[in-house]
Amino acid sequence: MAHRRVPLKRGQKSRRESRSVVYSGCNQLTALPFAMVAKHSEDDMEDRLRLEFVDDARDRLQRMYETVERVGKGIIPFLQGIAALSTEAHNLKGCGTAFGYPAVSLVAHRLEDYITGLTSLNARHIVDIDTYLDRAAALVERFEQPDLAETNRILRSLPVRYIFEVKDVEVRNVEVMLVTPSKVVARKVSMELAACGFRPIRVQDPIESISLAVRMPPDMLIASMVMDGLSGLDLIRGLQAISVTRKVPMALLTSLDLDNIVLREIPQGVGLIRLGPDFSEDVASVITRFNLG
């Protein structure tokens, strides 16, 4: 596989040329009123930061393309390559929203989730990862970022990596946000959801899950009851108070007994999934209750 550069579009300037354009207007500001100078300075800074992000994102994506190719050819060890990909995806995720490219962050988050837990890199994985990188690269080159509807279409078109073969499972266009810091719990729930043909999207940090859910409401949200920083119960309460996520079906994951006093605080309409012998039945019950199957 020949690695790809993220090309400059026709008429698009390089980083150095772009910076000269940003700074060229500085000398013209001296004769303007202070308020106008401040406004111009603010706009110039914003433009400069966006250009810096675009340039950095191009370089980062190119490194990721090259890493995938080198791992695929056996030039570098798998663990070294996957660690590099994870780091690049994580950094891209963190920068996108801050610099006005939230869709890039969302794609990077999905990529980070995709490569988490990979134990090898086969031909299918390479094609899938390249698809993520292609989507991110296209979004980086867009000055006008996609609206929520288009972003939703982009995200739902991204490849899904299931832990087992899903040839005999009807894959549904249903996304379930799974908020839990536990890898063991995430794997168990993800396998159950995948067996139903659903697309699990794991988020480790409950605070981060709020911004993700608000930007792109899932078809359902499942949260662990106990988490650092914000409990699953408080997370669900908060999301139910936000207009864009108020109607999202939600369920709590817990190992508590049904007679535990804490469970009495669960808001009406919220499902309950127990991490015990009744786990599969509880998942099925919640799916049926919310008419997702």
Image (cartoon, helix red, strand yellow):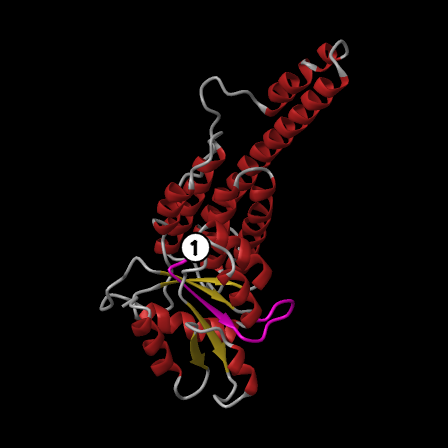
Q: Quadrant of the C terminus?
A: bottom left
The vertical placement of 161 against 192, above or below, is: above
Main secondary structure type of the part rendered in magenta: loop
Looking at the image, residue 145 lies above or below residue 117: above
Q: Give x and y (percent) for residue 285.
A: 33, 78
Q: Is residue 266 magenta?
A: no
Percent from the top left, x then y, of residue 7? 47, 28
Q: Secondary structure at mark 1?
A: loop
Against 78, residue 38 (above or below) is above
Dot 1 alpha-carbon crowd within 10 angstroms: few under 14, some 14 to 19, many 20 or more:
many
Quarter location, residue 161: bottom left
- The percent position of residue 107, horizontal first and vertical second, equals 46, 48
Left or right of residue 195, residue 252 in this image: right
- Which quadrant of the view contains residue 134? top left
Residue found at x 64% / y 29%: 46
Amino acid found under the numbered disc labelled 1? Pro
Q: Is residue 8 visible?
A: yes
Q: Observer-nearest residue: 30 or 155?
A: 30
Asked if one can make out residue 205 in the rendered structure from this viewpoint, the answer is: no
Q: Quadrant of the N terminus?
A: top left
- Return the residue nearer the eye: 56 or 143: 143
Q: Position of residue 141 (x, y in %)?
A: 47, 31
Which of the pair 39/106 is nearer the observer?
A: 39
Residue at 47 percent of width and 52 percent of height:
111
Q: Residue beneath label 1, please? A: 217
Q: Residue at x 48, y 73 (%)?
A: 267
- Residue depicted at 50% across the width and 76% down the height: 266
Q: Which residues are magenta?
A: 218-231
- Count of marks overlaid on the render: 1
